[in-house]
Image: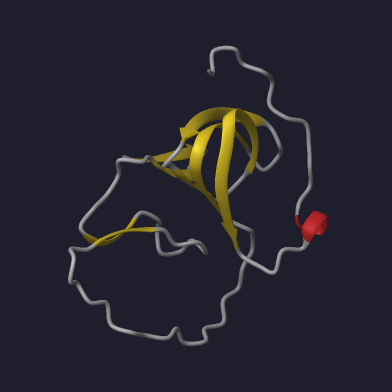
Amino acid sequence: MVETVQHGGQVLAIIVRKPASAPGVQFVTPPELSQQLAFMAHPAGKRIAPHVHLPVTRALETTQEVLVLRAGRLRVDFFDDERRYLESRVVAAGDTVVLVHGGHGFQVLEAVDMIEIKQGPYAGENDKVRFEPAPFDPRIP
């Protein structure tokens, strides 16, 4: 299952839940995003031709991140560009999240082991602005 989180016509995130799959190569992100995510499922014996990627100049306006949860549960809080809290989603082991626009924060619900992928080089604290977290919501487990 693929879920798109939107606000005001802007994609905030794309969440790919663990059971999601498709044969061959199926992209879940639109081609204009600077992070591309695809399902890849091939049968045993399938050969993928060796290749190199050509140098292509790309202009990036924002940093997009991909989180791959290997274990645990994580609440992802979504904010608009003005840092106003919008909503939350809970993701679990096996889920993948592409963070596209707006702000985001996290609350670890069960100890997590995850991989983060984003464009580099990473500029450390010069790469982001921190702000107040989302209010606690007891309805979100």
Q: Is residue 27 above or below residue 132?
A: below
Q: Nearer the viewer, residue 31 or 130?
A: 130
Q: Residue at x 22, y 77 (%)?
A: 47
* Camera sees residue 55: yes
Q: Is residue 17 above or below residue 118?
A: above
Q: Is residue 123 left or right of residue 96?
A: right
Q: Is residue 112 above or below residue 116?
A: above
Q: Give residue 91's position: percent from left, percent from top.
A: 48, 34
* Camera sees residue 11: no
Q: Residue at x 62, y 30 (%)?
A: 108
Q: Is residue 24 left or right of residue 99?
A: left
Q: Is residue 17 left or right of residue 33?
A: left
Q: Residue furthest right?
A: 126
Residue 28 falls in image quadrant:
bottom left
Q: Give residue 134's position: percent from left, percent from top.
A: 68, 26
Q: Give residue 80's position: percent from left, percent from top.
A: 63, 38
Q: Nearer the viewer, residue 14 or 72?
A: 72
Tag count in the figure? 0
Q: Nearer the viewer, residue 32 or 120?
A: 120
Q: Is residue 21 left or right of residue 133?
A: left
Q: Residue at x 42, y 86 (%)?
A: 52
Q: Is residue 9 above or below residue 54?
A: above
Q: Residue furthest top?
A: 138
Q: Give residue 120's position: percent from left, percent from top.
A: 66, 67
Q: Residue at x 41, y 42 (%)?
A: 94
How is colour applied across the structure in the image?
A: secondary structure
Q: Quadrant of the N terminus?
A: top left
